[in-house]
Amino acid sequence: MSLPRPVRFICTIAIFSALVFVLTFGGNLHAQQKFENQDLDRSRQMLRDAYDTVKKHYYDAKFHGLDWDARFHQYDEQMKTATSLGDSFSIIADFLGGLKDSHTFFIPPARPFHIDYGYRFQMIGAAAFVTRVRPGTDAESKVHPGDQIAAINKVRLTRATAWQLNYLLNGLSPQPQTQLFIHDGNGENRPVDILSKAKGTKKIVNLTGSDGGTDMWQYIRDAQNEDHTVRQRWVELEDVMVWKMPEFDLPDGEVDRIFGIARKHKALVLDLRGNPGGAVDTLDRMLANVFDHDVKVGDLTGREKLKPQVAKGSVRNVFSGKLVVLIDSDSASAAELFARVIQLEHRGTVIGDISSGSVMEARRYESSLGMDTKIFYSFSVTDADVIMQDGKSLERSGVTPDEISLPTAEDIAKQRDPVLAHAVELVSGKLDPTSAGKLFPFEWVAF
């Protein structure tokens, strides 16, 4: 179970054999590449693969009432009007977007460059704010954490459009420049043009080892650098343990080990803010560590009759102390399910912001073009909806916390974390907002 994360594309090294593979597609970010007939043919094949994969595997055989065949022919004709890779990829994404399903989406081929816009933004409540600015970028002197953003590239930011814009900018059509409209508090929106920072990479990457392993080891190092930023972190504050969990991607033994540390304390604050979800197995093991009995996550609906999802109470020594779960607008999928089960079972308290509302079960299907050299791309396709114990799905609604708790623009600017501080206070711990903001320092992926 995973949230769409177009920023992070991961290929499994085990699938590579004695071939040289093309891992990138397209040309220079700052120069408009000529869209050749070959590019059009490849893009049409990707669209065909999207059609076939969804038709075969999508959980709703009626496609929510869409005429899937007619829709494909419509978008195949539209593809002939594409003038760039960004256009063609956006057409494929729009084709799948008609299902209005958070977990059915296109993961396009990687490009021969890395891009950094120099800032991060997030929806907090109903407004968007700059949350981070990377040092040494054009953004550093133009925007600041705590600035409210009304729009980016003239797209007004709402909960619905924020993810779509992220997907467009980071996955489908990276841009050499973005224009932010900064809200000044007086009803005016000031335009700010920010140049992106780009770094070229090799267009053809050799993962066979025939080059002495240079490309393969670079691939591994890049993956390790990114994985380091999403490692599990925790802090022990006397009777309270605070666990920052970036994603649900842990083996059972590691889940049990961390909960073993938590059992030494009277309370656990589990921070799932920004957590996009992950593996169903990790979700089940997390729940098994806080309940001494089997817990039903929900009923699964798909093309075939599916068994309910149940977290088996198989852990001998569960954590029985006080539990507070933190969520925000970027908490999704498995993170949302965990928080909602805690609510429905009255096991703890959920505080923060309304979550993403991106809760389906999905599988990733890999595709490629070419023979000795290959272009890789893939599709995430929903194979089940999850109906919770209260008879409702979290898709497009999310989890409403027991207590709404949001940082202010000033908190963001001063890197304070009043939400975490309040959570610790709820379980009789002591932590001020300034100290809370320093517990888990933000780390940029090396660029």
Image (cartoon, helix red, strand yellow):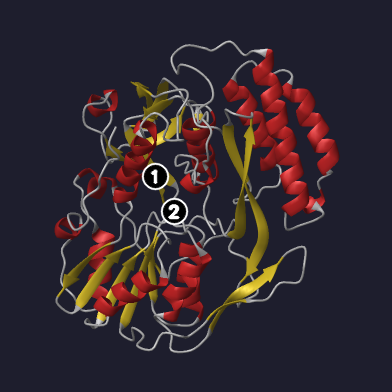
Badge 1 density bin: few <14, some 14–19, many ≥20, Cα 10 Å: many
Location of residue 254 by image quarter: bottom left
Q: What label sits on residue 51 in the rendered view?
A: none
Q: Position of residue 284 (x, y in %)?
A: 49, 73
In the image, what residue occupies the spot 22% across and 81% down? 265
Q: Position of residue 94 (x, y in %)?
A: 66, 35
Does residue 76 appear left or right of residue 143 in this picture?
A: right
- Could you tell me the amino acid type at mark 2? Ser
Q: Position of residue 358 (x, y in %)?
A: 55, 55
Location of residue 256 by image quarter: bottom left
Camera-side residue: 210 or 339?
Answer: 210
**Is 241 above or below relative to 398?**
below
Identify the element where label 2 is drawn: loop
Q: Position of residue 287 (x, y in %)?
A: 45, 77
Q: Are marks 2 and 1 in contact (CB under 8 Å)?
A: yes
- Could you tell me the amino acid type at mark 1? Gln
In the image, what residue occupies the spot 43% across and 52% down? 330
2 or 1: tag closer to the N-terminus: 1
Camera-side residue: 436 or 374?
Answer: 374
Badge 2 density bin: few <14, some 14–19, many ≥20, Cα 10 Å: many
Tell me if I can see residue 143 in this picture: yes
Camera-side residue: 193 or 88?
Answer: 88
Identify the element where label 1 is drawn: strand
Tell me if I can see residue 82 in this picture: no
In the image, what residue occupies the spot 52% across and 55% down? 2
Q: What residue would you read off at disc 2?
A: 329
Does residue 355 appear left or right of residue 265 in this picture?
A: right
Q: CA distance from mark 2 to mark 1?
A: 8 Å
Q: What residue would you read off at disc 1?
A: 122
In the image, what residue occupies the spot 29% across and 27% down? 139
